[in-house]
Image (cartoon, rainbow, N blue to C red):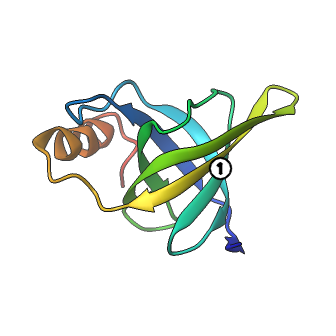
């Protein structure tokens, strides 16, 4: 499912009030309209909501949101995380997260 797609990610878990936690780095592997697979050094629990900043070459990062549908340890400290993509929550905290990334120099 999906097509091979490799890009750097900033990932944050959303709490019950849709507030993002501390971001960590990961890398995409596959992407389709409905799902994304990425590799992470951090394990992600099933059904958790995640927020992503997908860093593309010479462009502003795309923001995505998704629910974890699977997480398996692959070895060498990496987890394969499967995510069902969903609409972005219309929350100020999501917009603030992107602004914070810009302030840290992670957003072009």
Q: Which residue is mark 1?
A: 38
Q: Position of residue 37 (x, y in %)?
A: 65, 55
Q: Residue at x 22, y 44 (%)?
A: 94
Quadrant of the snapshot with the N terminus: bottom right
Q: Position of residue 91 (x, y in %)?
A: 14, 46
- 86 sits left or right of 99 in the view: right
User: Is residue 13 visible from the viewing direction of this image?
Assistant: yes
Label 1 CA crowd tier, 10 Å (few <14, some 14–19, many 20+): many
Q: In front here: 79 or 22?
A: 79
Q: Quadrant of residue 26?
A: top right
Q: Position of residue 12 (x, y in %)?
A: 42, 35
Q: Residue at x 17, y 38 (%)?
A: 93
Q: Residue at x 64, y 27 (%)?
A: 43
Identity of the residue furthest to the left in this view: 92
Q: In front here: 98 or 34?
A: 34
Q: Quadrant of residue 63?
A: bottom left
Q: Secondary structure at mark 1?
A: strand
- 87 sits left or right of 35 in the view: left
Q: In front here: 56 or 3?
A: 3
User: Is residue 61 visible from the viewing direction of this image?
Assistant: no
Q: Is residue 41 above or below residue 101?
A: above
Q: Quadrant of residue 104?
A: top left
Q: Position of residue 84 (x, y in %)?
A: 51, 57
Quadrant of the snapshot with the C terminus: bottom left
- 87 sits left or right of 7 in the view: left
Q: How many marks?
A: 1
Q: In front here: 74 or 46?
A: 46
């Amino acid at each position: 499912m999906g097509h091979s797609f490799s890009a750097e990610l900033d990932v944050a878990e959303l709490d019950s009030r849709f507030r993002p936690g501390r971001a960590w780095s990961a890398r995409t592997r596959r992407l389709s309209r409905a799902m994304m697979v990425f590799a992470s050094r951090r394990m992600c629990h099933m059904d958790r909501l995640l927020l992503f900043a997908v860093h593309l070459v010479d462009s502003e990062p795309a923001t995505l949101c998704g629910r974890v549908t699977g997480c398996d340890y692959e070895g060498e400290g990496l987890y394969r995380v499967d995510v069902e993509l969903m609409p972005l929550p219309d929350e100020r905290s999501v917009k603030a997260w992107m602004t914070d990334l810009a302030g840290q120099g992670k957003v072009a």
